Amino acid sequence: MDALISFIVIAYNARQTIRQCLASILAQEIAKQIILVDNASTDETVLAVADLPVLIVTESHKNRGAARNQGLQHATGDFIAFVDSDVELPRQWAQDALALLVHNPDIVAVGGPGLTPSDSWVSRALDVQQYGTHLDCETHRVPSLPTMNVLYRGNAIRAERFENFWTAEDAEFNFRLGARGYKFLWSRDLAVTHHHVTTLGQLIRKSFQYGMWYLAPYSRHPKMMDWGVVARIAFFPAILFLFVGGALCIPFVVGGTIAICLPLLAYAMIAARSRLLQTTRSKIQFVIVHSAKQYAQMAGIWAGVLNGMVRAFRK
């Protein structure tokens, strides 16, 4: 297909991975424009790739939404791809992504999973399920795609802009497109190498930080809230209510104890059904990793709510 793809890579202190990321984009056998948006890095990210044939622009406002918007201002391609700075694309990624868009004219964007090269038990457990999607599924429609590796039709998003969120800016962007009738496709065939977290501590910190912005897109698009979102929001208030009620009635304590274990039970059921988890050890690790991720994210949600309340009070 004779088309130009504008690749937008936003980077903040990405010196360790940015060269491999850009090299993988340069290796795509297709007409391309590559835009690197340096988001006020302090670790010589730009110097690490200064010799590569890419357009380098800067965004002083340290914010993922603002950085993506800076890239959009310079994008001229028929299609626009966002690739995270810690991602490496396989050589056929662009051609495969374009083929999916050609064969699915009602789809506005396509993307896939990010699989880590690390062999840590945390990484292996994360790879089995990402963004609510199981790797034993091949291709299906989803309400949103992470901008880790996604290809959009340029005419659909060229005039759009991301909200100034530190994270979850991609979900809000996609919810807005979805409200206009656009659809998204996730495909296992678009898997990329993603240097994501490798330890439980890193995962907990990252999930907590993500949780602090979790409600931002839903505050703009409440119709996108489903039972899973409501359950995450209600989890800690429900636990608190049950244990406070336990001062008056012992069954409340029992209910609270059971409620605390619900994420563990839910992921145990997923692990039991997964065709990718072959051993008891891998199933237990899956439950630990994804439950810890959920607990940290739900804690982050209420940390974000309380932080917002404090800021509003100070105003």
Image: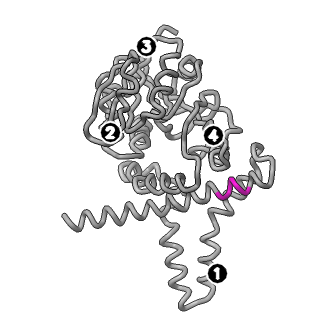
Looking at the rendered structure, the kind of residue marked 1 is Val
Image quadrant where residue 301 sits? bottom left
What range is drawn magenta here? Answer: 284-288
Residue farthest to the left?
A: 315
Residue farthest to the bottom?
A: 248
Q: Position of residue 239 (x, y in %)?
A: 53, 74
Magenta stretch holds residue 153? no
The mark lying in front, picked from 3 and 2, is 2
Looking at the rendered structure, the kind of residue marked 3 is Leu
Looking at the rendered structure, the kind of residue marked 4 is Ser
The mark lying in front, picked from 2 and 4, is 2
Q: How busy is the neighbourhood of tag 4: few (under 14 within 10 Å), some, or many (20 plus)?
A: some
Q: Which residue is mark 1?
A: 254
What's the CA distance linking mark 1 and mark 2? 51 Å
The mark lying in front, picked from 1 and 2, is 2
Q: How busy is the neighbourhood of tag 1: few (under 14 within 10 Å), some, or many (20 plus)?
A: few
Looking at the rendered structure, the kind of residue marked 2 is Thr
**Disc 3 or 2, which lies upstream in sequence?**
3
**Disc 1 or 2, which lies upstream in sequence?**
2
Residue 29, placed above or below residue 107 = above
Q: Which residue is mark 3?
A: 4
Q: Position of residue 143 (x, y in %)?
A: 51, 41
